[in-house]
Image (cartoon, rainbow, N blue to C red):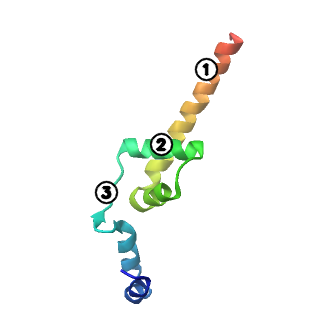
Amino acid sequence: MTTEEYNHYANGNQYILLFTHIYKGEEIMSKPTLIEVVKSVLAAFAGVQSRDNREKDFASGSASTYIFVGIGVTILFVLLIVFVVSQITGS
């Protein structure tokens, strides 16, 4: 579909715009698995996530899943830092 065709059909219709975000080419984007969410959160946490992956995450996943996994990763990171520091200082 060309840009002109897209603009003609979309013409302010939000359903069509949502439809084009859910469908990429001919494939239906499925909900990400827990492993895919964790990988995405870790990549974002490290600052190396690509723009394409970020857009895919926003289009196909629910925000609450990413938020909960992000909070969990942050807690694990803090606990890891506390453990490493306590081992180094001997406390």
Q: From the viewer's perspective, is residue 62 above or below residue 71? A: below
Sequence-first tag of 2 and 3: 3
Could you classify mark 2 by the number of other residues whose Cα lies within 10 Å: few (under 14), some (14-19), or many (20 or more)?
some
Q: Is tag 1's residue or tag 3's residue first in the polypeptide sequence?
A: 3
SS at mark 3? Answer: loop
Circles 2 and 3, Cβ within 8 Å, touching? The answer is no
Q: Determine the residue positioned at 44% across, 56% down.
A: 57
- The C terminus, quarter of image: top right
- Secondary-structure class at tag 1: helix
Please, what secondary structure does the residue beneath circle 2 have? Answer: helix
Please tell me whether residue 79 is drawn above or below residue 32 in the rendered image: above
Residue 25 at x, y = what percent? 33, 69
Residue type highlighted by circle 3? Ser
Distance CA(mark 1)–CA(mark 3): 38 Å
Label 3 sits on residue:
30
Residue that badge 2 annotates = 69
Residue located 46% across and 55% down the image: 53
Q: Is residue 54 left or right of residue 31?
A: right
Question: Type of residue at label 2?
Answer: Val
Residue at left offset 36%, top offset 80%: 1
x and y, in percent, of residue 8 in the image:
40, 89
Q: 57 and 67: which one is in front?
A: 57
Mark 2 or mark 1: whose residue is earlier in sequence: 2
Instruction: Please name whichever residue, 5 or 33, is drawn nearer the observer in this view of the structure.
Output: 5
**How far from the left and from the top, in percent, is residue 39?**
45, 42
Q: Is residue 41 left or right of residue 25?
A: right
Q: CA distance from mark 2 to mark 3?
A: 19 Å
Mark 1 is on which residue type?
Answer: Phe
Q: How many neighbours does mark 1 have within 10 angstroms: few (below 14), some (14-19), or many (20 or more)?
A: few
Mark 1–mark 3 contact, CB under 8 Å? no
The residue labelled by disc 1 is: 83
